[in-house]
Image (cartoon, coloured by chain):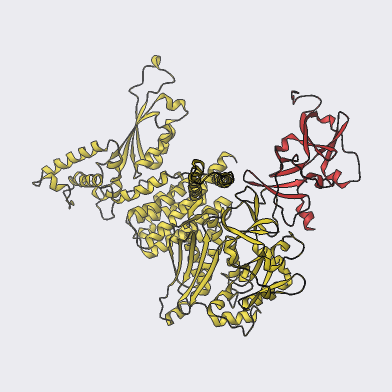
Amino acid sequence: MTQINPNNAAGALRELISFRIGAQEFCVDIMAVREIRGWTAATALPQSPSFVRGVINLRGAVLPIVDLAARLGFEGSETTERSVIIVAQIGEQVVGLLVDAVSDILTVTDDVIQPTPDVASDTAKTFVRGLLAIDGRMISLIGLERVLPDLDLEAA
Amino acid sequence: MDPLAAIRDTFFQECEEQLAELESGLLAMEAGDTDSETINAVFRAVHSIKGGAGAFSLDALVRFAHVFETALDEMRSGRLAPSQDALKVMLRASDVLADHVRAARDDGAVDEAHTAALAEELKALGPDGGADADEGSEDDWGDFEFKPMSVDAPDEPAPMVGGGWRVAFKPRADLYAKANETALLLRELGRLGAIEVECDASALPSLADIDPEAAYLAWTVTLTSDADETSVREVFEFVDGDCELEITGLQTDVGGGAGPDAGDAPEQVPGGDLDISALLARAQAAADSRPSSPAEAIPEPVPAEPVAAAPAIASAPVATATAAEPASPDGQGQPRKSEAGATIRVDLERVDRLIDLVGELVINQAMLSQRVMEAGFARASGVAMGLDELEQLTREIQDSVMAIRAQPVKSVFQRMPRLVREVGAMTGKPVRLVTEGEGTEVDKTVIERLADPLTHMIRNAIDHGLESPEKRAAAGKAAEGVVRLSAAHRSGRIVIEVADDGGGINRERVKSIAVERGLIAADAPLSDEEIDNLIFMPGFSTASEVSDISGRGVGMDVVKRSIQALGGRIAISSRPGKGSTFTMSLPLTLAVLDGMVVSVAGQTLVAPITAIVESLQPKASDVHSLGGHSRVIMIRDTYIPLIDVGMALNYRATPMDATQGVALLIEGEGGARAALLVDAIQGQRQVVIKSLEANYRQVPGVAAATILGDGRVALILDIDTIVAVSRGADSVRAEKRLAAAG
């Protein structure tokens, strides 16, 4: 286990949780993750974007489930018994992110994270905060601020 | 929040309580309850506000409170009779005081001229127009070391100076070690009245022997004040246990007229017995000089005695009487005090968290029961019986927790007297407000959201309901109109009524206005009740000219909507010449809801029962298509729009066969009716309301969510939105017309 030294000259160490959607790997800051739980069937919400799977009961709180694959512009996930919900804190709200599997906890310094190359995709601009190359795999660092549907955009 | 702001907040919270106390006290006095306890409570309220305001340097507030307090003191001491006129001035003064408090809180401004005028009125109440005695204390209001308040009757030959206390106080070293300070305590005592302080330095060793951390000094304070022992003890609250403290009542100097206040002392003071026996001894000595025996002398009311003997003799009966029967005027005050001591201030968030947790417990318990049943345990098995007990306990916990949030409706009722005074003055109609059932408890949120509709209805009752004094006279009624506001619990709900004794609803006019505004057809055959209910329709306002008071473009439809938003219903009954009564029935809490659990396109949904009038199985012959997906259903000769809930919520793309489902006849906003078509009814259940917005956002057609016994989330339907959305903006009016005409 790597020791975290906040005074490290190369930049503070960050811990990231990496997960898989289809063949691709993504990660989010571990500080945003409250817990990880198995998939339970969600109650569908009317008048909601297709990437909102519905709501589930998280110990008495009503938790919206965002299908991260659909949100990122891929084919929506097929939920299996091995699907996982990452419960994340986004601002004041708590949201469940449906992903295929959680793979790893990465400890990296900021300088390992490469800036997102200029690509045309809006989704990349909206969600991808940077790229990491770990053991030859590309892992995209996701920012969660915009994961929930934007009220203003919906209204337009 | 910085500590000072927090203290300030607390001060203003307490001010609100004091203001409420003040107003209810004054109203009680107006109603004839002028006993000393009530007057004292009123006085204390103003006094506490003044004291606190001084600490925050709220000068304007202190100044007005002081004038008010002075006038109240006159009344308290009996120099000013609690006449209706005087009390009316005081009630208005309490309004101004409330304005001052709010202005100080929100950094707002107050009406200086109005304040000055009332201050003058208050001063004028005092003897000789408030000229002499008050002036002195008025000048030194700044250092609120106000004069000792004597409670002697005005025509007494003034034996001078009410009760007082001897406080013997010897700090231990611990007191100083905890950073307490004698000087501060003494200063605090000084606030209660005039003090004489003696320091006993006899224990002080020679300089060489002094332990710098030890305590050697003791003080004896003679406090001349009518403060009760509790207030004196409160000064030492934080040093309790770190000092030797002895508080003894001073009775010997008290004149006979000082009864009620001085009577505090003997029954509360630990050393009181001693004191009383001393007094008795003296009384006996005095009595012995007369031929009668002491036993007779004591209970006898003592008539005019030689001046020298009077104080001693007179005080003895007072002391014994109070000790013997605690139900004296002071005895009445005591339960109130102990009540105050038994309450705590709790952050609302903590209570809500607790309620949430209990809600989860209820759900969990239901899930557990369901699983146990599924596992095939026999009903009589130990497990099942244990679960039954658990269920009962859970229910009890839920009820008790809900009771924490419950508050008496008093807090909203007591805002109304002022409103009535103001609206009465504005309309030139003398009005008396009668309130009943102020102690009826209901959830705090319900109370908060009741204020607006109630305000509106009371305004309406005075402005539209009551006739002008001339008309009342012509009708042989008392000039003063009566508005009655009452609350009561009825079958698990709270029922609130606003009634006036005015002219009742003018049905002819209501009908002609409704026709004029196109709300109903001119020839619509309406019953009296239906006409009365027209006033709840949007766009209806009976005031022929828009008045300042109630005609602000919003009408009873807004009231009805806010009551419905609380899960309540409102009804009106009116008798010509006798007046109108609005009756509201509301749920006791917003945390749970009585719901009809239904299935729609494979989903489980909950419809609020309050909105459902009836449910029925549609017959093919009653359902007609109006083109597109619009359908109507005929219920008792009236066509009512039939809304397919599955379609409205996009759960399915094609309408379901109406005969395969169940129609819920509902009454929504503005009294409009519609029928909701669902697949099946699963049953009725009380559900715990969970917010969707907390973690997501509002969803059109969904009011909130809940968690069912199987642990899954079910959505609670927002019936008004579903109805409105299914209609589309254009058709709304036409259908309302149709519904109302039906």
Quadrant into which the C terminus of chain B falls: bottom right
Drawn side of residue B529 relative to residue B281, left or right? right
Task: Identify by letter the chain in red.
Answer: A
Picture residue at 49% right of the left edge, 52% below the top: B406
Q: Which residue is farthest bottom?
A: B523
Q: Where B231 sits versus B133, above or below?
A: above
Task: Identify by letter the chain in yellow.
Answer: B
Quadrant into which the N terminus of chain B falls: top right
Q: Position of residue B301 (x, y in %)?
A: 18, 52
Picture residue at 77% right of the left edge, 37% below the top: A101
Front residue (pair B338, B61): B338
Q: Where B99 sits versus B345, above or below?
A: below
Task: For residue B116, say whether it is visible.
Answer: no
Q: Quadrant of residue B244?
A: top left
Picture residue at 79% right of the left edge, 44% below the top: A68
Q: Which residue is farthest left?
A: B291
Drawn side of residue B418 relative to residue A105, left or right? left
Q: Which residue is farthest top?
A: B208
Q: Position of residue A49 (x, y in %)?
A: 77, 53
Q: Position of residue B378 (x, y in %)?
A: 52, 45
Picture residue at 43% right of the left edge, 49% below the top: B47
Front residue (pair A102, B537): A102
Front residue (pair B127, B259): B259
Q: How many numbered marks, from 0 up?
A: 0
Front residue (pair B640, B124): B640
Task: For residue A128, say whether it is visible.
Answer: yes
Drawn side of residue A145 relative to residue B207, left or right? right
Q: Position of residue B386 (x, y in %)?
A: 49, 42
